[in-house]
Amino acid sequence: MIDFSVEKCDKSGARAGKLVFRGFKIDTPVFMPVGTYAAVKTVSPRELESAGAQIILSNAYHLHLRPGEELIKKLGGIHEFTGWKRGFLTDSGGFQIFSLSPLRKISREGVSFRSHIDGAKGFLAPSDVIQIENDIGADIIMPLDVCTAPDVTHAEAAGAAEITNEWAEMSKDVWERSGAQNSLFGIVQGTVFEDLREQCARRLRSLDFPGYAVGGLSVGEEHAVMYRIVQHTVQFLPEEKPRYLMGVGAPMDILESVIRGIDMFDSVLPTRNARNATVFIPGGRLLLRNSSNREDDRPIQKGCSCYTCSQFSRAYLRHLFKTREILGYRLATIHNLFYLIDFMKRLREAIINDGLDAFRDSYYRGEL
């Protein structure tokens, strides 16, 4: 089971804490790189460790389809299977099933779908997902939930939140009876409607999950809307439990959400951007393919100690992308992960040292 402690709380509500589970000790706030298929694209576990990653995320739906949880369990669980010896969180795949809209049908019993791989029919009940994640051997697991678009009606959002709550209750019952030594988080849904977020958060809180996630954001709504919903939702979640904002990975969104009391984040953004030749730098992003980098002998970011910045120029990286060399994708990914994880470390230090206001000001001046 998970143990969470808050080491320092800023006047804004930002928290610096520590998660302890299964022998792992994780500093929060924390960013979790995404390895949907149990691999963070283009980088090895050793490179993830060098970047400072403490925990990564994989997707139970995708791993259920390939290679199957039975094989992963047979080969010793997700840690042995992948060689990643630090923390593992598995998402249920609710968002991925949502994205298969023409191929799926939701009922109170679960989700009927057709595989995006070969069209085979499948069905997942909340209990099935818990069993899959237990078999995979993840440290933190998420229940099946219903994701919606940000522009749904209040009635549609209420229906989705109601099913999510019912599934959460079923999932917790199955999880407790399984005797698994991992930790199950409840997921607060309700899209952009504050009353639904409050209702969902209160109901999940009564179930006393080891941690709580805020889902259904960063799916197209404006930044201000996301921040408003995060601010509103957090006040109904227990202070002594970790809070996880799902699918958020832009530095600005992380900063503003930490200020509102969030502890954990994940996103494909840093790795996806890297594969599109876009890298994080103080003040924004750098497009490596741009002609302005053709003769630029500077690293991506002056003062960055990642392997990419310590060895290679913008000109060389541009050349790799122009010639579609795989090394370019890897080097850009290494930098983006290092940048974001280092950003989290500095943000945590700012909270501990009463410097969060100065950190925020420096970020918006383009210095971080």
Image (cartoon, rainbow, N blue to C red):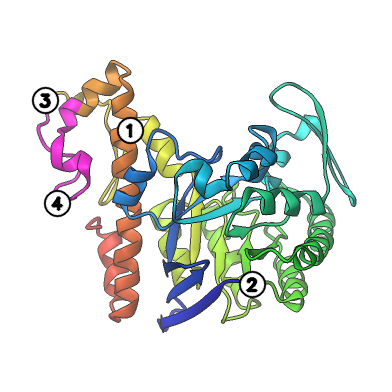
Which amino acid is tagged 4?
Gly
Question: Which of the marked residues, 3 or 1, is nearer the chain's N terminus?
Answer: 3
**Among numbered discs 1 and 4, the one appearing first in the sequence:** 4
- Secondary structure under badge 1? helix
- The circle drawn on residue 185 is none
Q: Earlier in the sequence, mark 3 or mark 2?
A: 2
Kindly indicate whether the residue at mark 4 contacts the one at mark 1 (C-beta within 8 angstroms). Answer: no
The picture quadrant where one finds residue 43 is: top left
Q: Which of the 4 quarters of the picture holds residue 256?
A: bottom left
Which is closer to the viewer, label 3 or label 2? 2
Residue carrying label 2: 210
Q: Quadrant of the C terminus?
A: bottom left
Question: What residue did someone put label 3 on?
Answer: 295
Residue at (75, 52) in percent of width and height = 131
* Residue segment shown in magenta: 295-316
Identify which amino acid the numbered label 1 is placed on: Arg
Q: Residues within 10 Å of mark 1 (few under 14, many from 20)?
A: some
Residue 352, percent from left and from top: 32, 79
> What residue did someone put label 4 on?
303
N-terminal of the pair, mark 1 or mark 2, is 2
The label nearer to you, 4 versus 2, is: 2
